Image: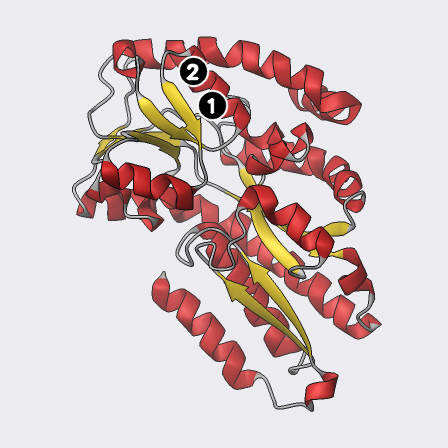
């Protein structure tokens, strides 16, 4: 995957002709995730397409691993203020900005790729309206593989959740894990890794994708496939920056966003197998048959959290959830 990213960016650089500096527009586009994680690949793909097709008139400069110091929860604010023109953020973390964005990471709601696609399509108009209020628009969405639990010790029964010091990725997952008996902390990956390394965090709620990108197997050699959620990341652009482009460049951006979205939702179909192969090669013990007690404890803890989300998400969120659940 590293060669994939490097090839995209190098190819775009080689194919972009030199243009006068005055004619160039540069957009910074960060993500807090590694270039090898699926959101990182999305940013690199989008940048490569725009950089090539625009002939150097518009340049997207991607950055990874929160190199700009902007984590997902702060991305909407950074794009709104123009600190960066565009950015990719984990939608669950954006729930701190507005509860609506926590929809895709509600527990045990969308547990297949088809379900995640359906939920995202239903929610897209609501996301668009909400983001417009922050002066930005969606470029594309990226699905994550299903969230599981990386841990230092195997989760052999529900009692393994008692007091488990686990990193969670949004307020909802924090509430679920605490209700199941764990001691959860809502942390970005960059904030979580030092705690994983020093042993103060002994479990991480993440997909195999995000965890593999951070080499969690060096510290947490067990992975339980609990299928907690298939959440999404959202890439957005500052609306004023987008509208300032001439019409032909806006079309290039739109086409690149469409192509990236298609690529991301296609790539997810083989991603799980690729991740598991890497994890097994690094001696991760993957638990695909989760003990019933663990699943039941998490499902029970999740019910009240979803009801609480409905109260906070407003009419837009409730309407999307009801439409998704409608037969």
Q: 10 Å neighbourhood of mark 2: few (<14), some, or many (≥20)?
A: many
The residue lying at 16 percent from left, 41 percent from top is: 283
Quarter that holds the C terminus: top right
Q: Position of residue 151 (x, y in %)?
A: 26, 29
Say how the picture is coloured: secondary structure
Mark 2–mark 1 Cα distance, whole angstroms, equals 6 Å
* Disc 1 secondary structure class: helix
Q: Which residue is mark 2?
A: 178
Point out residue 84 in the picture as x, y percentages from the top left corner.
Answer: 64, 60
Q: Are marks 2 and 1 in contact (CB under 8 Å)?
A: yes
Q: Is residue 189 visible?
A: yes
Q: Which residue is mark 1?
A: 174
Query: Label 1 crowding class (10 Å Cα cut-off): few <14, some 14-19, many 20+?
Result: many
Q: Which of the two residues, 324 or 128, is positioned nearer the viewer here?
A: 128
Q: How many marks?
A: 2
**Residue 298 screen position, x and y as percent:** 41, 14
Query: Is 210 placed left or right of 163 in the picture?
Result: right
**For the point 50% across and 85% down, which residue is it?**
14
Residue at the (33%, 14%) spot, across then down: 294
Q: Secondary structure at mark 2?
A: helix
On the question of residue 327 being in view, the answer is no
Q: Quadrant of the N terminus?
A: bottom left
- Name the residue at 23% across, 33% down: 199
């Amino acid at each position: 995957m590293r060669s994939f990213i490097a090839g995209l960016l190098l190819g775009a650089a080689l194919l972009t002709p030199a243009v006068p500096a005055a004619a160039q527009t540069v957009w910074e586009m960060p993500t807090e995730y590694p270039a090898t994680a699926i959101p990182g690949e999305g940013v690199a793909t989008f940048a490569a397409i725009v950089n090539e097709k625009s002939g150097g008139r518009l340049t997207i400069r991607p950055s990874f691993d929160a190199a700009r110091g902007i984590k997902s929860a702060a991305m909407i604010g950074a794009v709104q203020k123009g600190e960066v023109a565009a950015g990719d953020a984990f939608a669950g973390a954006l729930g701190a900005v507005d509860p609506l964005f926590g929809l895709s990471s509600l527990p045990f709601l969308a547990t297949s790729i088809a379900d995640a696609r359906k939920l995202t399509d239903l929610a897209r108009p609501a996301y668009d309206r909400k983001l417009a209020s922050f002066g930005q628009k969606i470029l594309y969405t990226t699905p994550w593989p299903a969230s599981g639990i990386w841990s230092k010790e195997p989760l052999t029964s529900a009692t393994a959740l008692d007091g488990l010091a686990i990193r969670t990725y949004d307020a909802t997952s924090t509430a679920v894990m605490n209700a199941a008996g764990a001691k959860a902390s809502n942390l970005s990956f960059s904030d979580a890794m030092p705690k994983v390394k020093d042993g103060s965090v002994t479990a991480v709620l993440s997909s195999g994708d995000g965890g593999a990108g951070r080499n969690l197997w060096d510290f947490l050699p067990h992975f339980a496939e609990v299928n907690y959620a298939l959440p999404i990341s959202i890439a957005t652009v500052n609306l004023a920056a987008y509208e300032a482009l001439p019409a032909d460049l806006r079309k290039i951006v739109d086409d690149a966003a469409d192509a990236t979205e298609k690529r991301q939702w296609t790539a997810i179909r083989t991603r799980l197998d690729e991740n598991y192969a890497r994890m097994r090669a690094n001696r991760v013990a993957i638990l695909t048959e989760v003990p019933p007690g663990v699943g039941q404890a998490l499902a029970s803890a999740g019910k009240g959290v979803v009801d609480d989300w409905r109260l906070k998400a407003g009419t837009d969120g409730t309407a999307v959830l009801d439409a998704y659940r409608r037969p």
